[in-house]
């Protein structure tokens, strides 16, 4: 999950002209492998900056408010991922043990590990489009109707996303994923096309703001790093990625669902929130 900013102008025609688009399969795969390359890791480390999502008060971490809805697939709640949370926690421990200063990095709880399948509304856009209009109680039912109106997927097993290495984002670190079967990637894109193509959601300001990027966020950076610390971060990530090349780790996604968050370390789903099979 990452913060987003996009002003909405015009109607559906403007949407088609100005929206970002999901990447073709080969471009997506090349992009992901490039992001875990040593040169790109060193480049990204020079650009990283504090997220402002979490604050260390000297004794404990305090999540900072950042509210919204998302369509997400939680690692622990999708079947056949029993060992994955432990493997990701192991990577977190290895990172925190080797990076400095240690209190510059917030380690997300394992229960928060997820793949965002579609962003909806967050922060100011969430407040303006949903809260101020009194639509929060109705929003889950709106999403349920959107899910119900989608073309059903043909019978298939879960989407398999192979985790290929750590990447550095603008304010965070996470595992990046590719799809060995192009149809698995296309299943994600078909869902997103139908979701973002819904006119009711468009009226609420829900639209595609960035291409789909397979990733699971593990750490947020919460202090400004100096030149030496940035270089150390890069070399630490590069060293871990060299070990990960020999592993065969997958995240299996059988379904995705509406989740509500008040900050970026906890994504809640009451029983009445809708679920969609992928």
Image (spheres, grey):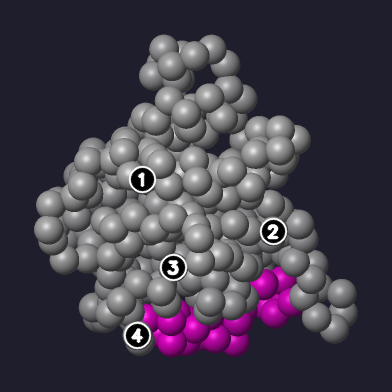
Q: Is residue 12 above or below residue 254?
A: above
State the extent of the magenta-drawn residues as a range: 84-106
Question: Disc 1 or 4, which lies upstream in sequence?
Answer: 4
Q: CA distance from mark 3 to mark 1?
A: 18 Å
Q: Position of residue 30 (x, y in %)?
A: 26, 49
The local crowd at label 1, few if under 14, some if 14 to 19, many if 20 or more residues have their Cα within 10 Å, is many
Q: Name the spot of residue 124 as percent of width and height, x first.
A: 72, 38
Q: N-terminal of the two: label 1 or label 2?
A: 1
Location of mark 2 (residue): 262
Residue marked by disc 4: 82
Q: Is residue 101 left or right of residue 161?
A: right
The crowding category of the residue bearing disc 2, from other C-alpha atoms within 10 Å (few below 14, some 14 to 19, many at least 20), is: some
Q: Report crowding for label 3: few under 14, some 14 to 19, many 20 or more residues within 10 A (C-alpha).
A: many
- Kindly identify the residue that appears in the image at 35 percent across and 87 percent down: 83
Mark 3 or 1, nearer chain start: 3
Percent position of residue 217, x then y: 51, 65
Q: Residue at x 34, y 55 (%)?
A: 276
Furthest residue toward right:
58
Real-space CA distance between mark 2 and mark 4, rounded to the nearest whole angstrom = 27 Å
């Amino acid at each position: 999950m990452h913060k987003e900013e996009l002003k909405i102008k015009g109607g559906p025609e403007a949407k088609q002209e100005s929206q970002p688009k999901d990447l073709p399969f080969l471009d997506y795969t090349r992009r992901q492998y490039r992001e875990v390359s040593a040169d790109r890791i060193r480049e990204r480390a020079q650009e990283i900056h504090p997220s402002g999502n979490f604050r260390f008060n000297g004794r404990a971490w305090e999540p900072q408010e950042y509210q919204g809805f998302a369509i997400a697939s939680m690692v622990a709640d999708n079947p056949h991922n029993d060992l994955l949370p432990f493997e990701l926690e192991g990577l977190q421990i290895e990172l925190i043990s080797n990076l400095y200063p240690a209190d510059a990095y917030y380690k997300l709880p394992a229960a928060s590990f997820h793949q965002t399948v579609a962003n909806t509304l967050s922060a100011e856009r969430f407040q303006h489009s949903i809260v101020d209009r009194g639509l929060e109680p109705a929003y889950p039912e709106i999403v349920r109707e959107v899910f119900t109106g989608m073309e059903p997927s043909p019978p298939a097993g879960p989407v398999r996303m192979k985790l290929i290495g750590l990447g550095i984002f603008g304010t965070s670190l996470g595992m990046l994923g590719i799809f060995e079967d192009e149809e698995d990637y296309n299943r994600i894109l078909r869902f997103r096309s139908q979701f973002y193509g819904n006119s009711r959601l468009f009226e609420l300001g829900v639209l595609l703001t960035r291409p789909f990027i397979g990733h699971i966020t593990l750490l947020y950076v919460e202090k400004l790093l100096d030149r030496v610390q940035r270089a150390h971060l890069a070399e630490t990530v590069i060293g871990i990625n060299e070990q990960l090349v020999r592993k065969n780790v997958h995240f299996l996604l059988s379904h995705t669902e509406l989740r509500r968050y008040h900050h970026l370390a906890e994504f809640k789903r009451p029983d009445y929130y809708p679920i969609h099979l992928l």
